Amino acid sequence: MSEATTDGSQRRVLLVADRGTEVDSLRMRLSVAGYAADSSDIESVIPFCTDEKFEPRPPSAVLLVFGEREGEGRLVALARRLRSEPSSFALPVLFLFREDGRSLRSSAQHFGADDYFAQDATAEELRARLASLLWRVESGRRSAPAVADQRSEIDNFLFLLDAVASEARAGATGSLALVVAGDENINAAHGFLKLNLRRVDAVAFYGPATLLVYLHGADAASARATLSRLREEFAEAQRGGELFAGVSSFPAHGAEVERLVEQAEVALNDARGENSAARVVVYGFAEAGTDAGHDAERRTQRMRAGGNEPAPTAAAGVLRAGGKLRRVMLVVSDAERMAQVNLLMRSAAYEVRAAFDGQHALSLLRIDRPDALVVDYELPGFDGVEMLRRLSKQSRGDAPPALLLLPSGREALRTEALAAGARVVIGMPYDAVELLERLRELCEEGVRE
């Protein structure tokens, strides 16, 4: 019995394998399951992603067939591309493993694969799994690709930055936006923007309540128009949910990713200002070269130097002490402790950004310089002391001042922590008054330097 589409034609799936991977047996089992199966290599599929040349019609699903380990990276890259191009975004994608492995399962989840299973699945299993998937697709019950864990989001953030840097260096046009939706709406905004921008790899978490969005090929004006339209649609979908966005673009505002992100932060602060009606603000407020543009440029230079530009408004979530900006990065993996410290910092009017482990923090600190770090010793992968050692090497001795939270019973590590770069070490359970006081001193120290 063949599986048919709504117009009565037989369902067709596309098998994509790296060179040398045998798919004849799999094609035969799919035929027994009722599906017509075409096969292709990776190079032949890429034009389909970008030029919409699936002939005579798109397949019902794309099955990526993994063979030898050497080809894994190429197929994962193709999965990324299938999910990022508008012409192939909606195609169901399945990973078929020769050997099950944690890295491949993680990749499948990260890049939004609809399912993954073994290549030697029986015809009955293939029929059941494909039928279930395609029913969900056609009935509108297909769930949005879910992120497996925080590490996947970190990887997506870094991939997005790499993509922007590559295109900016090549002289292409594009825009970066920082988008805030409020803690209660941030996950909804994340999914909404991915769906409506039709590029799942163009939206990443920049902080606990902030998204980094890449608008490929859009100049500042078109990016502002797109985000303004989406802001209105989001407000309708979320019953008044609000989005604020700050935009910078290349080449108009430069080609260095670090500068572009900083400029988007400046624009976001103005979008969140209590007198801002725009809600979507482009860096410079005017075309490059105007007085407004120069004012924003000078403000960014002061930010880079830890300068003393007055805070735009209290509504922007920023407070300065002695004219200096207070921005703190928390590096805490324990969820309960993160919530406690985060609440304490925000109650003291700090702008807080979170990192979930040492590697996440090191990656963020390549493009961000807070006034101070609050680092938990107990981190997965490597501990807080090792993170500070790596940060010192990465920053060549110019890292933000750090406060380390040291668990009780580990006092022997205090000297080691100070040698690694911690300016302050506080034992736990910490005293909230002491923590805030020492943090205030660190922020003042950071902006003086």
Image (tube, grey):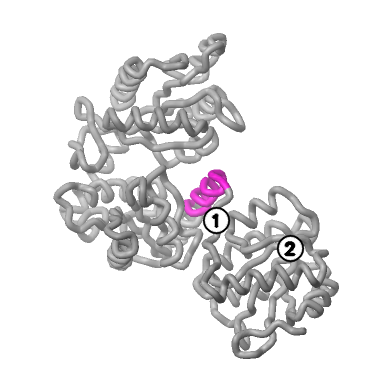
Horizontal and vertical percent for residue 202? 46, 59
Q: Is residue 316 above or below residue 4?
A: above
- Residue designated by label 2: 96
- Residue designated by label 1: 146
| Residue 46 picture quarter | bottom right
Q: Residues within 10 Å of mark 2 (few under 14, many from 20)?
A: many
Horizontal and vertical percent for residue 9? 66, 89
Horizontal and vertical percent for residue 12? 69, 81
Q: Which residues are magenta?
A: 149-161
Residue 392 magenta-highlighted? no
Horizontal and vertical percent for residue 60? 63, 77
**Nearer the observer, disc 2 or disc 1?**
1
Q: Is residue 209 left or right of residue 5?
A: left
Real-space CA distance between mark 2 and mark 1, rounded to the nearest whole angstrom: 18 Å
Q: Residue at x 41, y 43 (%)?
A: 207
Q: Residue at x 67, y 65 (%)?
A: 94
Q: Is residue 62 left or right of residue 365?
A: right
Q: Residue at x 27, y 40 (%)?
A: 301
| Residue 190 picture quarter | bottom left
**Label 2 SS:** strand
Amino acid type, mark 2: Leu
Q: Residues within 10 Å of mark 1 (few under 14, many from 20)?
A: few
Quadrant assignment for the C terminus: top left
| Residue 365 picture quarter | top left
Q: Is residue 399 left or right of residue 35?
A: left
**Label 1 SS:** loop
Amino acid type, mark 1: Ala
Residue 155 magenta-highlighted? yes
| Upstream in sequence: badge 2 or badge 1 | 2
Q: Is residue 248 above or below residue 58?
A: above
